[in-house]
Image: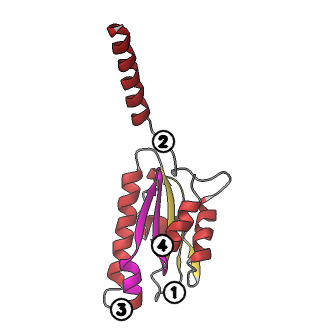
Amino acid sequence: MKKLVGILLSLFTFGAIFVGCSSSSSGNELKDNLTLKNVVEKIEEVAPMQMPMEADEEMAKNIYHLNLDDVEEYYIKSAMVMNSADNTVIVKAKDSKVDNVKKSLETRLTDVQKSFEQYLPDQKEKANKGKILTKGNYVILLINDDIKSAENAVNSCFK
């Protein structure tokens, strides 16, 4: 009887460890049929951008500091005018490249913050409130007037 209890206890412990250590993708994958562009559009619904412009590959590399070898796909929109700090970026990093992509977007956030240090106090404040989110292999940079609503919009796009 003691052996049976010991075996059952061992199996229960092993099962609990196995379940506790298993990876969960909860909240880390886009909902079915959503694209990166759809996510940015959802963000723009709650935090509109002044004169938005899509970034091309050269901008992704030179302005957003992305190494495209680390990236599966991306979608970037920023304000076309120099008097706005607005940026919305979503990048799906390749496996094991999330940290590289996050560092690139941290550099972009710092660049925007520095560009408004002496110029346009409202945009400086907006840039300083900018936020980087990570959801699985997705890295998102948000700089806009309503970070909380933008973050909620992002969360609504993930399952």
The residue range painted magenta reads 123-147
129 in magenta? yes
- Per the image, the residue denoted by label 1 is 81
Is the residue 16 above or below the residue 30 in the image?
Answer: above
- Per the image, the residue denoted by label 2 is 24
Label 1: how many residues lie within 10 Å, few (<14), some (14-19) or many (20+)?
A: few
* Image location of residue 130, percent across then percent down: 40, 74
Label 2: how many residues lie within 10 Å, few (<14), some (14-19) or many (20+)?
A: few
Q: Residue furthest right?
A: 33
> Mark 4 and mark 1: span between their CA atoms?
23 Å
Q: Closer to the observer: label 2 or label 1?
A: 2
142 in magenta? yes
Left or right placement of residue 115 versus residue 133 in this view? left
Q: Closer to the observer: label 4 or label 1?
A: 4
Kindly indicate whether the residue at mark 4 contacts the one at mark 2 (C-beta within 8 angstroms): no
- Per the image, the residue denoted by label 3 is 119
Q: Closer to the observer: label 3 or label 2?
A: 2
Q: Earlier in the sequence, mark 2 or mark 1?
A: 2
Q: Tell me the kind of residue under disc 4.
A: Lys
Task: Indicate the quadrant where residue 111 lies.
Answer: bottom left
* Image location of residue 54, percent across then percent down: 58, 72
Is the residue 15 above or below the residue 41 in the image?
Answer: above
